[in-house]
Amino acid sequence: MSERWLDEIRWTSDGLVPVIAQQADSGKVMMFAWMNRESLALTVSEGYAVYWSRSRNRLWRKGEESGHRQKVLGVYLDCDEDVILLKIEQQGGIACHTGRESCFYRTLKDEQWQAVEPVLKDPQTIYKK
Amino acid sequence: MSERWLDEIRWTSDGLVPVIAQQADSGKVMMFAWMNRESLALTVSEGYAVYWSRSRNRLWRKGEESGHRQKVLGVYLDCDEDVILLKIEQQGGIACHTGRESCFYRTLKDEQWQAVEPVLKDPQTIYKK
């Protein structure tokens, strides 16, 4: 596989690029994470989102524990070549580790962050290891 | 105005937070930028997106030159309290400095980034100063 398309990305000094994952059919923004060169290459070759976990300092195949994998339907690059947008199909309908559909489940109302999305599945049953 | 909701955000070591701007009605992801504490407070108090320009090192009232302001309809926070999602109404229908609707106008096809959105307005006429 040619890697020229990877060279065109303006990686951070840490070798990362921010990634937005958007549900392809509904347009819902599901989550935000980071990728390094290897994880983006794997995302494209495997067809499922592979992030770089900055907290665990390792490749993170989204859904590797929960089964909530993200099938990649499209990969987009922004005008500055430093942000990636993925159009995905969220398996299980849950992207967030809290058991909600999207990680962006809180909205600012009356100067407070208020949860406006239901928990669809108890996180205890998602991560049962 | 109480600033407790600002304290709940986990700012980067540079005092910034990444921000995704999404067109409220269509769900289209328009752009990605950064805010500092002051710009997020101004975004909420003014009702229009105010970013922090890292390249110019100053507040950036989106649309200050182009007129393509972003009316803020909703502000969301993710599960890790370190990413903001704005639901906006894009004035002029153009978010990108290239004259396209969205900054994410290139998609990966045959191992190449290919532009898949039309230029709606010549950038020369957008920034005529």
Image (cartoon, coloured by chain):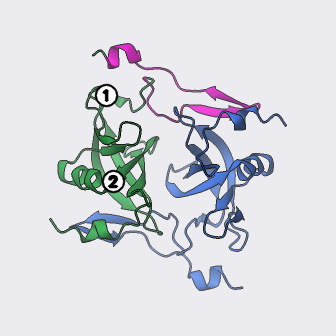
Chain colours: A green, B blue
| Secondary structure of the residue carrying numbered label 2 | strand
Q: Position of residue B20 (x, y in %)?
A: 54, 51
Residue lying furthest right: B1
- Please give the name of the residue rendered at 41% of the width and 15% of the height, measured from the top-left corner: A122
Dividing the picture into quadrants, the one containing residue A109 is top right
Q: Residues within 10 Å of mark 2 (few under 14, many from 20)?
A: many
Dividing the picture into quadrants, the one containing residue A57 is top left
**Is B94 drawn above or below residue B18 in the view shown?**
below
Quarter containing the N terminus of chain A:
bottom left
- Please give the name of the residue rendered at 41% of the width and 27% of the height, measured from the top-left corner: A97
- Please give the name of the residue rendered at 42% of the width and 23% of the height, measured from the top-left corner: A99
Q: Is residue B3 left or right of residue B86?
A: right
Q: Which mark is residue A36?
A: 2
Q: Residues within 10 Å of mark 1 (few under 14, many from 20)?
A: some
Q: CA distance from mark 1 to mark 2?
A: 26 Å
Q: Nearer the viewer, residue A21 or B60?
A: B60
Q: Which mark is residue B24?
A: none
Give the extent of the magenta segment: A99-127
User: Which chain letter goes with mark 1?
Assistant: A
Q: Position of residue A119 (x, y in %)?
A: 47, 20
**Is A75 drawn above or below residue A63 in the view shown?**
below
Q: Is residue A116 magenta?
A: yes
Dividing the picture into quadrants, the one containing residue B114 is bottom left
| Secondary structure of the residue carrying numbered label 1 | helix
Name the residue type under label 1. Answer: Gly
Q: Position of residue B28 (x, y in %)?
A: 49, 53
**Is B45 drawn above or below residue A102 in the view shown?**
below
Of callouts 1 and 2, the N-terminal one? 2
Q: Are marks 1 and 2 on the same chain?
A: yes
**Is B95 drawn above or below residue A108 in the view shown?**
below
Q: Which residue is mark 1?
A: A92
